[in-house]
Image: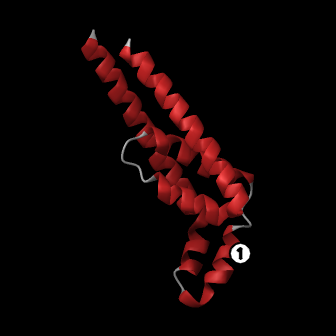
Amino acid sequence: MKLLHQHRLILIKLLALIIVLGLLILIYESYKPEIKLFLNPNRHQQAVAAIRQHGWSDLILVWLLIFFGTAIPGVPVMLLGILSGLCFGILGGSIVNMTAIGMGNIVTIQLISFFKN
């Protein structure tokens, strides 16, 4: 019985990792022109301005990425938080970070308590 719970937990972690990788690919494709601008040292200001023009779909993608990243051990959520602050400014990035990390931790605690029983 305990082995079945461990297999479920591994399956959930693997599914979350696949979702995170998919979200990373979506965000990379969405921000590819801005990344190229950002790699040019003379165009950093233009890159930051272009990144901040992204809309709600990118906000949801970044939120989901931070949410799932919080639930997977070893994912560098700090880097995702920096990305969030860069994309949505200080206040918007802070709100995205706080809600996504908070909800990710709550869901993780619920999953742990579910599998512990």
- The amino acid on which the numbered mark 1 sits, given as a three-letter code, is Ala
Determine whether 15 is above or below 98 in the image: above
Label 1, residues with CA under 10 Å away: few <14, some 14-19, many ≥20? few
Q: Quadrant of the N terminus?
A: top left
Q: Residue at 66% x, 47% y: name it.
A: 60
Q: Residue at x 55, y 56 (%)?
A: 81
Q: Secondary structure at mark 1?
A: helix
Between 73 and 29, the residue placed more toward the observer is 73
108 sits to left or right of 115: right
Coloring applied to the structure:
secondary structure
Residue 14: x and y, percent? 37, 35
Q: Is residue 1 above or below residue 46?
A: above
Q: Is residue 117 left or right of residue 94?
A: left
Q: Is residue 43 left or right of residue 54?
A: left
Which quarter of the rendered picture does the C terminus lie within?
top left
**Residue pushed farthest left?**
3
Q: Position of residue 100 (x, y in %)?
A: 60, 43
Q: Is residue 9 above or below residue 22?
A: above
Residue at left offset 49%, top offset 48%: 22
Q: Whole-percent x and y of residue 52?
A: 71, 67
Q: Residue at x 56, y 69 (%)?
A: 32
Count numbered badges in the picture: 1
Residue at which label 1 appears = 49
User: Where is residue 51, by image quadrant?
Assistant: bottom right
> From this viewpoint, is residue 54 visible?
yes
Q: Can residue 19 be seen in the rendering of this structure?
A: no
Query: Would residue 6 appear left or right of 17 to someone viewing this image?
Result: left
